[in-house]
Every structure is written in structure tokens, then in C-alpha cells.
Image (cartoon, coloured by chain):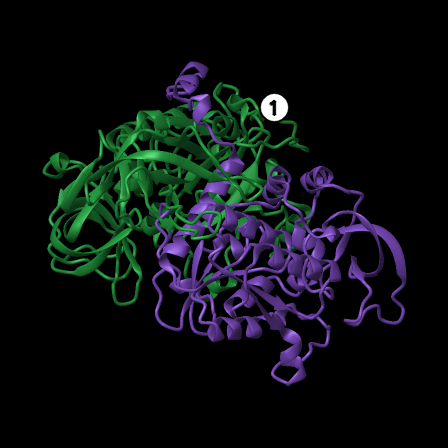
Amino acid sequence: MSTTTLTPGRAAEQALPPEYTLDHLDHLESEAIHIFREVAGEFERPVVLFSGGKDSVVMVHLALKAFAPAPLPFALLHVDTGHNFPEVLEYRDAAVERLGVRLVVARVQDYIDDGRLRERRDGTRNPLQTVPLLDAIETDRFDAVFGGGRRDEEKARAKERVFSLRDAFGAWDPRRQRPELWDLYNGRHAPGEHVRVFPLSNWTELDVWRYIERERIELPEIYYAHEREVFNRDGMWLTAGGWGGPRPGEQTLSRLVRYRTVGDMSCTGAVDSDAFDVGAVIREVGASRLTERGATRADDRLSEAAMEDRKRQGYF
Amino acid sequence: MTTTTERAPTPAPAPEDPRHRHDLLRLATAGSVDDGKSTLVGRLLYDTKSVLADQLDAVERVSRDRGLVATDLALLTDGLRAEREQGITIDVAYRYFSTATRSYVLADTPGHVEYTRNMVTGASTAELALILVDARHGVVEQTRRHLAVTGLLGVRHVALAVNKMDLVDWDETAFKTIVVEFEELSARFGIEDVVAVPVSALHGDNIVSRSERATWYAGPTLLEHLEAVPVGTSPAAQPLRLPVQYVVRPRTAAHPDYRGYAGRLTSGVVRPGDEVVVLPSGRRTTVAGIDRADATGGVHELDVAFAPQSVVLRLTDDIDIARGDLIAAADAPGLLTREITGTVAVLSDRTLRPRDRLLLRVGTRTVRTMVADVVDQLDIKTMQHLPAPEGLGLNAIGRLRLRLAEEVAVDDYRVLRRTGAFLLIDESDGSTLAAGMAEAPDRSAGEGI
């Protein structure tokens, strides 16, 4: 071959000296911390979406590291579907207590109670989160909203920017997105607009788990294998509960399961698992043949463009 | 740095040994329409087992719906409905895959329509450009453009995938002819490291698995090459730069007087005791300490920090420092200037003309600027610098002379990428108009793309 093929000698000569190499998690962490600090420097009223789910827990962990030894300079915002796993709510409240931060809760239930939103026939409340979210952003005049979305999750997310400009309706207009170059994030926005910021953009599900292991981050227990009363719907294990399941004919049984994602109980499925600790979860995720959303999120199965549609309407 | 105690399921060497750390390679793809880029990226994801069963099911279903006999891997990277409806292409989609030794962030840039804009965006963070050429068509005008952008953006490594080799019967001469022409061009754009691989993305030859058909080819498969390419530049070889992002002032009972400057080192190495200069003020001081948060929420002091780590610096003197300032090595502080000449790639519909008043963003600093002069425009076909009396329009590459309202610290992009890069921003709607790469003043008068 006539090309300048890399010989081992040349590669070794060009390689970084060992004392200056970073592991890929160090790269991702440094990038995320840089993003948090950019937002703190450029925006007036940032807020972190915090559900108690693993991605939001990792976000808060990174935000703390970005500003230490100062306390977290942001409030937290939880959009509560009302279909919560009790373990996750407990975790959320304990975390807020420990961090001493302000938690804003936007409740879907309030909107259903006063008629501004109507319960869907399938009982799923994830799509109903958009309106309470946008109202909370407007009421508290949040100008930057951190979300835990990752580009590896879904194809609409694969094209998301780190700084995602949203109009007064929270809508994501692919045409208006700014090219994002180097690490020069452009957060300029008009009054009434806001920017969604995704510090975990370049992380994969496995990266998140490896980081949880490395940093010894505590998670709600439902991420690990446990016995649970579940029933099967559309090939997913759903937890029986006040939200409306099981329907007549759906058999409840006790199984050893864990959750890969945490969301609205009515559309978040558990997977069969005997992964009792983080090491076992990493092995399981690494060997899984299903994406976390494909395996556990009924709302993403609604249509091929389900996530894209929700994003354009102002979803996370 | 704490390290992972276990790295299952992929058997990786002990992470304690830094020579065997699982590292990160950012790459950008570029290809013309119908070069088979989507198929190649799909193949790379599929053959590294980065595509999971439900994604594959969806692709198989759509392939069947469209009446295809074989599964079309290009559908793995298919566009969004909004793009089809609006006839637009969102500039870059990001893909992720990993092997036992490396994680990859792949910026997948569509080759058509707004090609320059797309590729400039993808290449800005890439260390390697993966450029596709169709074996039947060889080097075409688009290829020149891809190489020009690659060279301009300072991407050091290029992998040339000569695709559709099956359609030229794996003809060695055809491959070599393309490679010779490609290498000549690469050299003109200042790209030194080029590795060419003959592939068939459709059949998976030489992407991850070795081709049985190219018996004459002894080089690496595409993935083998990606695994071997050295990543990063040694921080020790470059001067310290740390754009200040945020001033950390806890004012808590535990830290009543703490004052630290948070930022990510864009280049270089820093140790306590090092003399630094703060720009634009020019004040000199010494690094008192380098702090980094640990996993428990506490802070520990580092003996050394290096690019691209995010840290907090404490300084010995109580001087006025804010976001937008640059902390630099005292013995190599770079250029402090009220005028920048640089090459820009225009990313928006707004044509850039003399006397345009804009914002310029470099590092963490944003200043007002005025276009003093549109120096020239680069003609990709002929590689000539031509006058640009009409200004620079969308997708144009050319040079601007910019007057700044205040002094700004800036580096030569070819030497220090992160502190030589700048954005031009529309003050009225905040949109990003152009990506720029500053030149050293002694270079401004001369050649260069």
C-alpha cells in the first residue's frame, strides 16, 4: 500500500504520555462540568430537571462537582405525573433535604383535577408532562433547563444540541437550532424563550452506569433486582397500582425484576433481572440486546416518531 | 483520579495502568451523496454490536415496508420526519459505539445540501475525519471540499474509505489511483496522516472484519485503524490556557473567604507555584492551589492539572478576575489584540459584509466587533483566493479582518485550536453566523487557507 500506514513505532511516539491520559469517563465528566459552568456563567435562572431517575441523579452529582466547595447554584424541578414509584419519591425528598436546595414540583394531577388536562384513554401520563413543565418554566422565569437526555437514547435525540433553543411554547424547531462548534456554546435567547441544556449528551447508558459505579452514587432501590408484584402488558412487566392496572384478565404475579428507566408507572416496564448491585447491572446492560427505551417505555412505542413529536411540542 | 474497579462485560485491561485506559476518540464522517456513508456508519454500528435488537427490528420492518430484499443498514441513521417534511437536514447526528479499548463519538454529517456548514460543525471537535470516496467515481469536487474543511479545522488524522470496491471487482489499480490523488490533495491542505482502506460497506468488507476479496490489501481494516490512531496532543507540549468560566465563592461557614476560578484547561499543564498571567488585564500572579471535587462532595487539591480537565484554580494575589478572562502561562501568554484576521466558514443565510456589526465569542469572552474587511474567498475548485466584493454567503469560506471593541486574548488556531477558534454571532437574534479560526499576525498577510 502506498499510504502512510501507522506503524506501531510511530503510534507510540505520538501517543499521549501516560501521566496525561484521561479515561473516557474523565473526558465525559470534564465536558459535563464545563457545560454546567457555562450555564451558570451565562444564564440568570437555571434549573435542573430532577425526577430521581438515574440520569437526573448523575446530573446533580456532576453539578455539585462543578461548583464545589460552593453549594449547588440551581433549583431542582420535578414534573410529577402522579404515578410515582414510592421508592423514587422518597429518594427525591431525601436528596433535596441533603443538598439543601429548592425543589419546584409541577403536578400533572393538579391540571387533571381542574380540567386543564384530560386523562388519556391508555392512562399514560408521560405525554401530559409538557404543559405543567412549560408553565413552571414560565412562572419561575427559568431561562435554562438542564435535562438528562442522551443522544444514544433515540434518533430524535441523536440530533439534539447540547444547548437546545426553545420558543415561548417550549417547541423544538429543528430549523432554528444553531450549529454547535468546538465547545463554544451559544446560549443567547430572546425574552420568553429558554434553552434546554443536556450535559449528558455524549454519554451512553453504559457510561452512566460505569460512572455510578466509579463515583459510588446511590440510586433508588428499584434500579436493582427485587421481588415485585407485576403483570404483563405488551410484553412489559408493569407494577400494579392506583394508576389503573391491572385490567381484568391481566394476571398479577411475583417476579424478580428491576427497572432500567424510571418514569410514569403506567408506561415504564420492569425487566427480568437478578442484578442486585451496580457491577451486575453493568454486566447486564452490556449484554442486553434491547435499548433501554425499547425495553421499558411504552410511550416510545406509540409511533415511529413518538419522541420527535413530543420534543417538538415542548417535551424534555 | 479514582478509577473503575470493574469493567465488565468487555474484558479490558486493568484501568489502573494509564497506558491501557479506555479512551475516547471523536471522529467526523464526510461523504458525497450516494457514497454509501449511511450504510458504512450503519455497518460500523452493526458490526461492533452497537445496534440492539429492537433498533434492528425497526430497520428490518421499514426495509420490508419499502420492498427491499435485504435489510438496509442505512436506515439505522435515517433522518427525522421533520427533515423529510421540511426538506432540510439537521447538520449533525451523533452516534456512539465502543470496543474493549475505546469509546467513539461519531459526528455523522450529511454530505448534501448544506455540506460545508455540516462538516465544519462535525469536524470542529473531531480528531479524525473519515472521508468516503466511491471507488467508481474517485476523487470528486466534494472530496476536495471535505479535505479543505478537514485541513482548515485542523483535524490531524484522515481515514479514507474507498467504498463500493465490490463494484470495481476489487481492482487494486483503481484503489491505488484514488489513493495517490487523495494523498496529493491532502498534502496541499496540510494533512499529514492519511490511511486509506478499500471497503465495501454493503457487504461489510474491511469495515470491522477483514475482506477475503481484497487479497492484495495488507493494511488495517477501518476499525483496526480507528483503534490504533493516537488520540490527543500531549498537554506538556503546549502552553497553559484556561478560560475562566465562573468564579466560585461559597461564602459559607466552612469556606467564608474561598475564591476560586473555575474552568477547563484548553491546553497545557498547570501546577501549584506556576506563574500565570491574567488576560486582558495583564496582571501576573502565581497559582496557589488547584482544586477538584471528589465523589463525596468534598474538595481535594491536585499536584497537577492538564487539558482537558475541568478544575478550580486559586491564585496568590487578590486581583479582579471574572468570566471571560483567560489565565495563561506567564512565559507564553499568546496574543492580546484589538484586531483579528481569520478564516471563517459562513453557517447562516446572512451574508457577511464590510462594516457589519457583530458579536465575537472566543473562549468564554464575548465582545463587539466590526468587519473591517472581507479579505478574500477561497475557491474550492481551484484552491485560489479570490476577491469577494459581494461579501461571504452561506457555505462560503474566506478571510475577514475584524476590529474589536476591546482587547482580546487569542491564539493562532493552527497552534492552539480551542483558544484560536471563534464564533460570529448576530446581535439581534443571537444566531451563530460563522465559525472562525484566528491567524497569528505574522501569518495574516501571507498565504493560508
The answer to which of B148 and B290 lies nearer the viewer is B290
**Chain B is shown in which shade?**
green
Kind of element beneath mark 1: loop
Please, is residue A106 above or below residue A27 in the view? below
For this view, does B334 lie left or right of residue B39?
Answer: left
For this view, does B10 lie left or right of residue B26?
Answer: right
Please say whether residue B106 is visible from this viewpoint. Answer: yes
Q: Which residue is found at the position 29% from the left and 67% from the top?
A: B429
Q: Residues within 10 Å of mark 1 (few under 14, many from 20)?
A: some
Rendered location of residue B309, percent (x, y): 42, 37
Q: Which residue is mark 1?
A: B13
Please, is residue B178 above or below residue A25 in the view? above
Q: Which residue is found at the position 61% from the left and 23% from the top?
A: B13
Classify the position of the C terminus of chain A by image quarter: bottom right
**Chain A is shown in which shade?**
purple
Rendered location of residue A132, percent (x, y): 57, 74
The answer to which of B133 and B234 lies nearer the viewer is B234
- State which chain disc 1 sits on: B
Classify the position of the N terminus of chain A by image quarter: top left
The answer to which of A302 and B85 lies nearer the viewer is A302
Rendered location of residue B424, percent (x, y): 25, 54
Amino acid type of the residue that numbered disc 1 sits on in the rendered structure: Pro
